Amino acid sequence: MTRIAGVAGSLREKSFNRGLLRAAVELAPAGTSIDVLSIDDIPLYNADLEQAEGIPATVERMKEAIASADGLLLVTPEYNNGIPGVFKNALDWASRPASDIPRIFYGRPVAVIGASPGGFGTILAQNGWLPVLRTLRTRPWLEGRLLVSRAGSAFDEDGNLTHEEVRAQLRDFLKGFAASIAG
């Protein structure tokens, strides 16, 4: 069984990206599971807080889930042509202390997908993740790309992915990513 940790980078309950992650769980290929991780309760990174109180329990749980997974799926919104601050903050916390970076990130297969109401999907946010993933020495999967543009027409009012063509693209993307992890 291939285990993937999936993280959506939005705090909004009915966000397109949370819906995209829910659809990924549903559409994962046979022999693959996607465990949904939450960034909802992760505080803003503060080195004083880290020094005084250590790593928050919510961050420790996320780190352990990533470390025990075979791969990581980042489902990114795009805010003002870039990576959402709350999402980057979660990975910044996950890289603390720096001595944990090898255990959590080194060589870990990572794929990035995303949905946006704009016409270009999340291309700039996805590209923005590449320097971060390189710095953490992950193994980005670059064989496929999933950019859901005009997401308002692909999701229902509850944030569920209903567009059949996009669902098929997501299914194919996950199949390719899972196959790359399995070797």
Image (spheres, grey):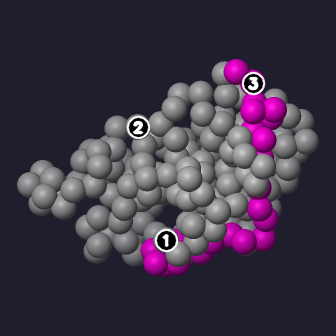
Q: Is residue 114 visible?
A: yes
Residue range highlighted in magenta: 133-157
Q: Is residue 109 visible?
A: no
Image marks 2 and 1: residues in contact by CB distance under 8 Å: no
Mark 3 or mark 2, earlier in chain: 2
Magenta stretch contains residue 121: no
Mark 3: secondary structure? loop
Residue at numbered disc 3:
156
Residue reaching furthest to the left: 52
Mark 2: secondary structure? loop
Residue at numbered disc 2:
40
Closest to the observer, 83 or 63: 83
Amino acid identity at mark 1: Val
Mark 1 or mark 3, earlier in chain: 1
Q: CA gap, disc 1 to disc 3?
A: 32 Å
- In the rendered image, the quadrant that contains the C terminus is bottom right
Which residue shows up at 51% across the image and 32% down it?
Answer: 12
Residue at numbered disc 1:
132
